[in-house]
Image: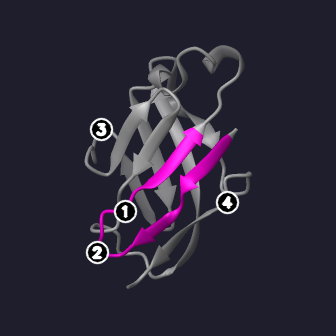
Amino acid sequence: MAQFLQNIVYKGKNNPVTIDYEFKGAFATDGLANFTDIQVLIGEETYTLLLDPTNIVVNSNTQFELIIGVDTTLAPGAYPLTVFGVGVAYPEGFVLNEPDDELGRVHIKQL
């Protein structure tokens, strides 16, 4: 299960979207540490931990931040997220949440 602790991006600002996971089963112990890359799709944009380390910050095995306010070209609005974990055991990616799941939407706002 995933939930937002913060889900608003202000264009031109550094406010993070904070996503917190509660892992069960095989991921319960290591959580996000099971992956060498976290990939986030939002609107027409993709951010990855490996290619965009200032945009995705892993805080713990259960939490990461997406910091895109300065970089995003998305218009103001509400966007679903799709998050994948990629690693040795999951080279094609493991879906951590889909756009239609309980996570909800990220809101892009212009000040």
Marks 3 and 1, the one that precedes in the sequence: 1
Q: Point out which mark residue 12 bears.
A: 2
Asked if the residue under mark 2 is in contact with the one under mark 1, i.e. CB atoms within 8 Å, the reply is: no
Left or right, residue 92 beside residue 99 = left
Q: Point out which mark residue 71 bears.
A: none
- Distance, label 4 to label 3, CA atoms, is 25 Å
Looking at the image, is 14 positioned above or below residue 57? Answer: below
- Distance, label 4 to label 2, CA atoms, is 23 Å
Marks 1 and 4, the one that precedes in the sequence: 1
Asked if the residue under mark 4 is in contact with the one under mark 1, i.e. CB atoms within 8 Å, the reply is: no
Residue visible at 66% across and 15% down in the picture: 26
Find the magenta span and give its range: 2-20
Query: Which amino acid is tagged 4?
Result: Gly
Query: Which amino acid is tagged 3?
Result: Leu
Q: Which of marks 1 and 2 is in front?
A: 1
Where is mark 1, residue-wise? 15
